[in-house]
């Protein structure tokens, strides 16, 4: 099923981007190469090209358009896939929510998704979180003053979180940025097993917080598709990375952003655009 969906995307992207004029060359293309081709474009051009592809598909066939949207949605929204891209995912959902080739009933789902998709979107301000630290003190995400804030949503009972935390304990890039007062790494436990949270050690450079008001889970201030999950914010708490499951991706982005503390948010988003070097 996954291969079938990817083949649909390949076919549409070959048409949209004129990737090849011969069948033999087209057969050599793979999903990763096609998507790398998109992200090799400048960010604004990539978004324009994707919009054109969706426009063209919507004018040809409702069936093909729905298949394309479903495939893109899966590939772009899944945090654990290399194809994860929140900006392109948002573009796809917004396009589907107003697509003339869909009827009112078919547009209901993407319209319902828009609130979640637009929440904490790249370039927009992140929702504030009031958190409690182990000493019982209450703090707010908005009060952090460093150039960058990396939120590490985690659960002490999560095996994947334990593996990522072990890597965080040896990650010199993040440690050095914290020492230089460029970065704050904020761990947030979102559930209500407080005893487990208190007993679970955290790397010393990470602020260990608990969402005592249950804003993330209860009020759905953040949409966490899996754990652990990273969000990267700039000094004004605008989102640079959303729903990022890969620590490797986080480290790559942090390396790219070094020295860009005073740049505007679009310059930062442009700088980190290409996912797969």
Image: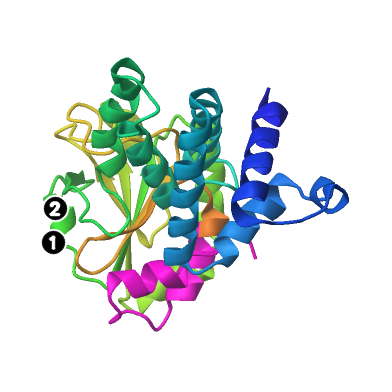
Residue 71: x percent and y percent? 56, 32
Local SS, label 2: strand
Name the residue rendered at 23%, 46% in the picture: 134
Q: Tag 1: Cα neighbours inside 10 Å, few (<14), some, or many (≥20)? A: few
From which residue to which does the magenta span run?
A: 250-277
Residue position for label 1: 143
Residue 151: x percent and y percent? 33, 52
Residue position for label 2: 140
Is 57 positioned to the left or the right of 93 in the image?
Answer: right
28 or 195: nearer the eye? Answer: 28
Q: Can you say which quadrant of the picture contains the C terminus?
A: bottom right
Local SS, label 1: helix
Residue 67: x percent and y percent? 55, 27
* Marks 2/1: CA–CA distance: 5 Å
Name the residue rendered at 33%, 29% in the picture: 110
Residue 236: x percent and y percent? 19, 66
Q: Is residue 85 visible?
A: no
171 or 261: nearer the eye? Answer: 261
Residue closest to the far top = 105
The answer to which image quadrant residue 40 occupies is bottom right
Compared to residue 265, the image places residue 48 above or below, namely above
Name the residue rendered at 50%, 31% in the picture: 65
Is 184 positioned to the left or the right of 230 in the image?
Answer: left
């Amino acid at each position: 099923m996954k291969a079938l969906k990817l083949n649909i995307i390949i076919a549409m992207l070959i048409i949209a981007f004129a990737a090849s004029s011969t069948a033999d060359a087209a057969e050599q293309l793979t999903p990763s190469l096609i998507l790398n081709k998109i992200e090799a474009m400048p960010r604004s051009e990539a978004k324009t090209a994707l919009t054109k592809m969706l426009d063209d598909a919507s004018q040809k066939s409702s069936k093909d358009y729905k298949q394309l949207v479903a495939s893109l949605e899966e590939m772009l929204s899944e945090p654990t896939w290399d194809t994860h891209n929140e900006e392109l995912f948002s573009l796809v959902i917004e396009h589907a929510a107003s697509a003339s080739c869909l009827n009112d009933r078919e547009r209901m789902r993407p319209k319902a998704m828009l609130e979640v998709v637009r929440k904490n979107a790249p370039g927009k301000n992140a929702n504030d979180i009031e958190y409690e630290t182990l000493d019982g003190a209450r703090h707010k995400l908005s009060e952090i003053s460093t150039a960058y804030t990396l939120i590490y949503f985690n659960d002490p009972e999560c095996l994947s979180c334990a593996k990522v935390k072990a890597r965080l304990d040896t990650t010199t890039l993040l440690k050095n940025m914290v020492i230089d007062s460029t970065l704050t790494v904020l761990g947030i436990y979102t559930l209500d097993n407080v005893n487990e949270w208190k007993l679970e050690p955290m790397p010393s450079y990470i602020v260990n917080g608990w969402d005592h008001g249950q804003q993330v889970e209860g009020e759905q201030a953040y949409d966490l598709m899996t754990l652990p999950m990273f969000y990267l914010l700039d000094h004004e708490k605008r989102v640079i990375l959303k729903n990022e499951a890969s620590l490797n991706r986080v480290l790559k982005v942090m390396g790219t952003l070094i020295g860009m503390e005073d740049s505007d948010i679009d310059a930062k988003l442009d700088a980190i655009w290409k996912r797969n070097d």
